[in-house]
Amino acid sequence: MELLTPTFMFNRSNPQSKDPVKELEDTFQYLLHRTGPLAGLDILQFQGFINTKYADPSADYPDVQYQHIRFAFNDVEATRRVSEVTGFTDEVYKAVFGIPNSKAEIYMPLAVLQRPKSRGTIRLRNKDPLQPPVIDPRYLSHPDDVRVLVEGVRFALRMARSRALRRFEVLPSEERVPACAAQPAGSDEYWACAVRHLATTIYHPVGTCKMGPPSDAAAVVDPRLRVRGVLGLRVVDASVMPAIVTGNINAAVVMIGEKGADLVKEDWLHAGSD
């Protein structure tokens, strides 16, 4: 789960606006000389990980990841695009993006929940294999997931007050999520409400065909990635993960693919030699 809040504004007198001509010049500069803004690291490339007070002290992984996004002053096209992808209503869009971005450049450190405890379900709708399944993600159904994301917001607010960011006069937007307006501003109750209204899934769904022992009734595949009760069928992708890994899943999925290929070769090359 990724949380699209809080929104910070760069309080400076000469905000950077989106300039199509400059974007074209930057593109040619990069293509011709491999220099300029496109040759460097954009803010989107910066990642961070922290342990909140809810992190398991016996574990070797953090519980919140940060991604970052910045919008030029009054960049309606980009903010609208992000809002549409996340399914925000116009009312929420105005509070999170529209009003702050009409005043200044905005920056958002996006808290991403690691190792969520909430568990969803995916079931067959009926006996017709062409019918779409019934998916219930049950996002944030475990209260610990909400608590961790609230702590993620708290850290982002503290980070904005750091010496490194103070020189950019980064100020949190005073606009509030409309559905949470009854909660005291800045309180844990307000941020918990904001989490439930603004958090969204991001990129890496896993575990819909999880691996597990025969004693686990919810396990779909065995340790050799074979679907239980179905002859000749394996699942070799992120859906076999019993629990999501910390951070992005790319490396783990590559490993699953390599292992799956080895298992297929072990079974079928041996069978062919017989």
Image (cartoon, rainbow, N blue to C red):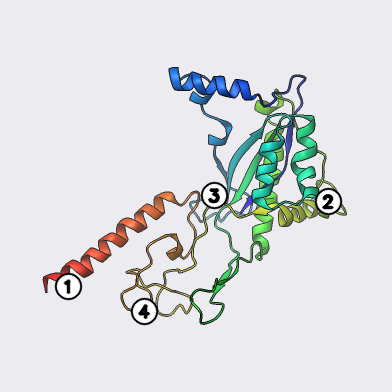
Residue to which mark 3 is pinned: 62
Q: Amino acid at mark 1?
A: Ala
Quarter of the image for residue 47 reads top right
Instruction: Note whether residue 59 is visible.
Output: yes
Residue to which mark 1 is pinned: 271
Side of 150 relative to 269 (left or right): right
Identified at 73% across, 23% down, the residue is 15
Q: Nearer the viewer, mark 2 or mark 3?
A: 2
Q: Nearer the viewer, mark 3 or mark 1?
A: 1
Q: Residues within 10 Å of mark 3 (few under 14, many from 20)?
A: many
Marks 3 and 4 sit apart, C-alpha to C-alpha, by 38 Å
Q: Amino acid at mark 2?
A: Pro
Q: Nearer the viewer, residue 49 or 18?
A: 18
Q: Nearer the viewer, mark 3 or mark 4?
A: 4
Identified at 68% across, 56% down, the residue is 147
Residue 38, image x, y percentages: 52, 25
